[in-house]
Image: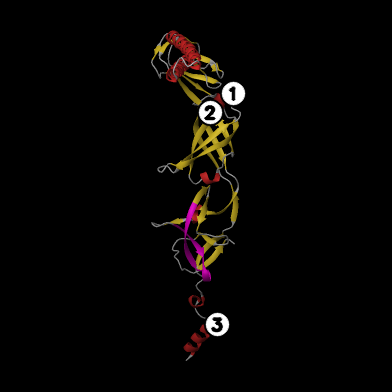
């Protein structure tokens, strides 16, 4: 009779077994409350310098080159005559055309006098006027062609190509010289489509030219091309340096550093962003502290963080740790974060 009493007493003193007193506290996770943060992004891009203002000089008249005194690297001024072609034949034709025009003027004057005295008909007078107009037109054509035998620099610049020599006979439309403006040097860089919306014309950038060492020169965005490569998802941005540093030449490699303007963004740790076959998603703390799967769209990667452009709002609590075994609807025990 003593044994049952002892068992009852032990039960009363120790209480119920521990497993019966433990209440399920939920899946332990760590969360972060999402708030807008001010961010700017710094990226570096490489490109080659080229002259935006460049021209190739062609001849519009064929002939022997009688004068060509400039070479690659020579500086030229606007309007300077660079190439002269043999113009002997054209001058002779122009002289003949001028004589014909002068004779047509005399004939018209004579017929006008006769017409005033009703000795010559109006028909003959009109023919004389037509002959004079044709002679003047021919003279003008030859004067224009004669001007084509002297080829001038269209702007102040530097000769970059010399493709013919004095004494060569150049057929019509031969590429003779190339001239570029060294103050119009730009570089074209290719930028991610995600970064393009943050750039604007006039934004300042830093430009480093490898050939000139580590010095960083001031540059600015001058143009953003309106199309994006459908394979690389990158667009073209033009950058120029003003003023152009001494020693900079077209073709040199340069490095452009872009720092975007500070903008408010919703960001989360990159490790919190999950992916499946359908899309990207995160777990957020939902109603009754249960896990909710939220589909999102990510933007720029900012070091160890990533921008969320769609799917979250300020104040959402995102799970950042404790994903193993986590499912939508799971009760959560928040062990970290705000």
Q: Residue at x 46, y 42 (%)?
A: 227
> Could you tell me how far apart the alpha carbons at marks 1 and 2 are, in whole angstroms?
14 Å
The stretch drawn in magenta includes residue 93: no
- Per the model, the C-alpha gap separating discs 3 and 2 is 83 Å
State the residue at coordinates (49%, 85%). Answer: 7
Judging by the rendered image, the residue that carries numbered circle 1 is: 246
Tag 1, which secondary structure?
loop
Q: CA distance from mark 1 to mark 3?
A: 94 Å
Question: Which residue position is annotated with label 2?
Answer: 210
Residue 66 in sight: no
Tell me the chief SS of the magenta region.
strand
Q: Give the vertical position of 23 relative to 328 (above or below).
A: below
Pinpoint residue 225: horizontal percent, then vertical percent: 49, 39
Q: Which residues, given as a range, are shown in magenta? A: 280-298
> Percent position (x, y) of residue 123?
42, 20
Classify mark 3: residues with Cα within 10 Å, few (<14), some (14-19) or many (20+).
few
Q: Earlier in the sequence, mark 1 or mark 2?
A: 2
Circle 2 SS class: helix
In the image, what residue occupies the spot 55% across and 36% down?
222
Q: Earlier in the sequence, mark 1 or mark 3?
A: 3
Q: Which residue is mark 3?
A: 13
x, y (%) of residue 210? Answer: 53, 28
């Amino acid at each position: 009779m003593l044994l049952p009493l002892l068992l009852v007493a032990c039960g009363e003193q120790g209480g119920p077994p521990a497993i019966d007193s433990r209440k399920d506290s939920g899946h332990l996770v760590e969360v972060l409350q999402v708030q807008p943060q001010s961010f700017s992004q710094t990226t570096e891009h490489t490109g080659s310098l080229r002259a935006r203002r460049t021209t190739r000089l062609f001849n519009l008249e064929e002939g022997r080159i009688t004068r060509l005194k400039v070479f690659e690297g020579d500086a030229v001024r606007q309007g300077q005559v660079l190439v002269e072609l043999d113009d002997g034949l054209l001058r002779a034709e122009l002289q003949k055309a001028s004589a014909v025009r002068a004779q047509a003027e005399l004939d018209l004057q004579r017929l006008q006098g006769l017409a005033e005295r009703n000795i010559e008909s109006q028909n003959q007078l009109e023919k004389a006027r037509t002959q004079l107009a044709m002679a003047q037109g021919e003279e003008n054509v030859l004067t224009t062609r004669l001007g084509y035998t002297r080829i001038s620099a269209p702007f102040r610049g530097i000769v970059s190509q010399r493709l013919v020599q004095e004494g060569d006979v150049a057929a019509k439309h031969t590429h003779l010289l190339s001239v570029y403006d060294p103050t119009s040097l730009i570089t074209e860089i290719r930028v991610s489509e995600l970064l393009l919306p943050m750039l604007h014309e006039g934004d300042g950038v830093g430009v480093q030219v490898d050939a000139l060492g580590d010095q960083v020169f001031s540059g600015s965005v001058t143009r953003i091309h309106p199309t994006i490569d459908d394979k690389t998802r990158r667009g073209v941005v033009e950058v120029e340096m003003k003023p152009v540093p001494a020693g900079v030449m077209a073709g040199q490699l340069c490095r452009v550093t872009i720092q975007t303007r500070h903008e408010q963004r919703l960001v989360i740790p990159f490790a919190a962003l999950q992916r499946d076959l359908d899309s990207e998603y995160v777990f957020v703390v939902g109603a009754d502290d249960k896990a909710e799967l939220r589909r999102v769209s990510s933007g720029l990667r900012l070091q160890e963080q990533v921008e969320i452009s769609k799917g979250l709002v300020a104040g959402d609590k995102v799970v950042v740790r404790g994903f193993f075994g986590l499912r939508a609807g799971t009760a959560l025990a928040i062990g970290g974060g705000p």
